[in-house]
Amino acid sequence: MFRARTAGSAPAVDSGGRSYRQRGALSRGSGAVMGTLARVVHLIVGIIVLIIVAGIALVLLKANPTNTIVSDVHDAARWLAGPLDGIFSFHNARIALAIN
């Protein structure tokens, strides 16, 4: 009676004569690029947040500021959070540094 067609045997064409499959392939390619770009941005933001949180934790835990690792992390965190420095003012310097 009826013959089954294999998937994709009938071409799907829009009014402009372009195949839907071709358009889908292009959108999949750009979607893959955007997904990769989103993952890279997410990774960079995660590293930045980790550095800032580590700097705050080192200040709150009173880590030795003369230690090279502590001073490097603190300097990097201060540089990354620099534009936001001094938004709030507190009497306690440690609390002001942690909040700002």
Image (spheres, rainbow, N blue to C red):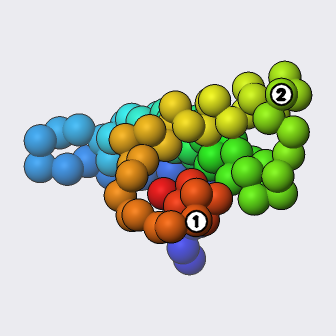
> Residue 60's x, y, as percent?
75, 59
Residue 52 visible, this angle = yes
Q: Which residue is at 50% across, 67% downward?
A: 91
Residue 21 visible, this angle = no
Q: Which residue is at 35% across, 58% downward?
A: 87
Quick check: 4 left or right of 58?
A: left
Which quadrant would residue 92 be assigned to in this image?
A: bottom right
> Residue 39's x, y, as percent?
60, 42
Q: Which residue type does callout 2 highlight?
A: Thr
Q: Whole-Å distance between the Cαs marked 2 and 1? A: 21 Å
Of residue 33 and residue 64, the one placed in the foreground of this image is 64
Q: Secondary structure at mark 1?
A: loop
Quick check: 17 left or right of 28?
A: left
What residue did someone put label 2 on? 66
What residue did someone put label 1 on? 92
Of residue 38 and residue 46, the one placed in the foreground of this image is 46
Characterize the local packing of mark 2: few (<14), some (14-19) or many (20 or more) Cα atoms within 10 angstroms.
Answer: few
Which quadrant would residue 65 be assigned to in this image?
A: top right
Q: Which residue is at 73% across, 26% downward?
A: 72
> Residue 68's x, y, as percent?
84, 23
Q: Secondary structure at mark 2?
A: loop
